[in-house]
Image (cartoon, coloured by chain):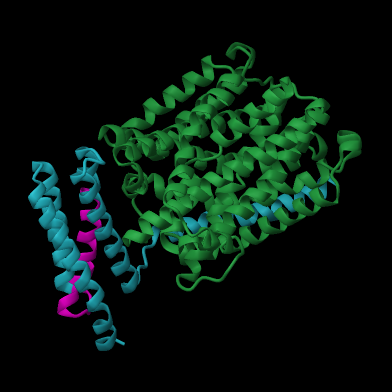
Amino acid sequence: MARIAASFANTTLCFLLGAVMLAGLAACSSSNAGGQQARTAKSAANSAIMVIDSWTTGAVPSHYAKATLRSLAQTLADFDRQQQRADVSDSSKQSARQLMAAAGRAEDAIKSGNQALAEQARQDFRNAIAKLVVAKPADQATNP
Amino acid sequence: MKKLLEISLGVVTSVGGFLEVGSLATAAQAGALFQFQLVWAILLGTICIIFLVEMAGRFAAVSKHTIADGIRERFGFNAFLWPLVSTFLVNFLVLSAEIGGVCIAAELATGIGFQLWALPVAFIAWLLLWKGTFGLIEKGVSLLGLVTLCFVAAAVILKPDWTRVAISSVPSLPHHDTATYWFMAVSILGASISPYLFMFYSAGAIEDKWDKTYLGTNRAIAGLGMSFGGSISIGVLIVATLVLAANGITQVDDYHQLPLMLTPVFGFWGFVLFVASLGIACFGATVEIALQQAYLVAQGFGWNWGEDRKPRDDPGFTMVYTVTIFAATIPIALGLDPLKLTIFSMALTAASLPLTVAPFLFLLNDESYMGQHRNGVISNTAVLFVVALGFILAVVTIPLQILGGS
């Protein structure tokens, strides 16, 4: 019985060790498809809009809003870098740039406590997201 | 009356102690990306953990052995070494993720970076283990954990389409992101069927000196406590669907996004409730997992163990939780993203299940341990199902982590 149990345990542990190694390798690699990048950026932009909304209504503290927008701005900056390098339409590149600029504006608005600037940043985000959605089918048409 | 009070307290502590960083993060990610579609994974995980917890409690109450103790005694130390090593390693990662969860809560509350909170959090948890009693840890922290019921309240306030929620309790194929869908399902199962949960429960039954008169209490706590606990995870998924997904947030890659779940429902109090829920739930899990690591090693090597003993009476036991808890802070103090660590460790937990669950089949059917309280057909079917599920998870976790892991 003990031998069977040990053999069973051995097999399972091999699976586990394999899983650890491969999962570690997978975690290190970052193969991100274009559609996935755009979706991550759109999700980050929508998160930024929610943060601005919550901050303007006093539902979240300023330190949280600042830190969150800084982190989301990082995601959007990565997206912008990838878009500028990628073979995509100019409108896609432009909307990525606009998202990054909106994130910077939103961060400034929170830092200075300027609600009007925050409202403008929110509008910029909405415009850029709309362009990002519109840009996607055109990209697919030009780059099948 | 006394039994009823014990059952109530047991159920309440199970509910309060159910949610932790893994179930919170996986349910939030699943709700944001797949809406209600993964409710079935939480339900399946909850049903599995109900059976395992009931069996772990019954085994302890009847045989006066913990599960770890039973595995070592029944199969010998060499065979026990494998589940010991794998469970210890997986628990270590989960412990690190839980410490990360408390640190995120502290960062959200104060604005001071989460890395800087790793050591203070570990110290407070260690102090509680050093000075506290099992009752204080089991009941005190878990009762505070009832704050996590705010997710259920938020889900009800948001008025979901309950028919859609009910339909989602049956597994269905995804319409997009197939690999991510299955990876999320595996992670949810890993978060729900955590070996530390049922192993800690069996050690707790010994600490609380359970005997055969507690079998009814055990069944009630396992059934009601875990069911209500699972409903909190479903609450998180519903809130993530109706708040995050509804606002176009489909990717929860950043822990900063999580508090946004409750602010549209409760305003500023939503932020406070989220921080409190995350902090308390993860702190409770931190203390329990550190304690479980000590139980596991002490029981495996036959040392003295018991949270109610003085540290000088069980030095090995005390040393294990001390070293583990401080070592687990290293990844967080070095700045490893707690959310990524959480998802990774939940998938590995799922992959390690066969090693910890398969012995149930032997232990719970062994007359010398269980006498007339051996497993029936239903319990054995449940164990076989979890073992089979564990094997499938162990095999699929690797490709899914590569294809669908974030």
Q: Residue at image x 39%, y 58%?
A: A28
Is B293 placed left or right of B151 in the picture? right
**x, y percent for residue A137:** 28, 82
Which residue is located at x 60 percent, y 11 percent?
Answer: B312
Residue drawn at (17%, 73%) of the image:
A93
* Chain letter matching colour cyan: A
Q: Which residues are magenta?
A: A69-92
- Image: A28 above or below B224: below
Q: Point out the image quarter for the N terminus of chain B.
A: top right
Q: Is residue B247 left or right of residue B233?
A: left
Horizontal and vertical percent for residue B402?
47, 64
Residue depicted at 83% across the width and 27% down the height: B212
Front residue (pair B276, B22) = B276
Q: Position of residue B224 (x, y in %)?
A: 66, 39
Q: Residue A74 lies in magenta, yes or no?
A: yes
- In the rendering, at what x and y percent does residue B93 appear? 50, 42
* Colour green belongs to chain: B
- Label count reads 0
Task: Give the answer, above or below, for where A120 lies relative to B131.
Answer: below
Task: Judge whether residue B269 can be spotted in this image.
Answer: yes
Whether residue A18 can be seen here: no
Quadrant where the C terminus of chain B is found in the figure: bottom left
Q: Quadrant of residue A100?
A: bottom left
B363 displayed left or right of A133: right
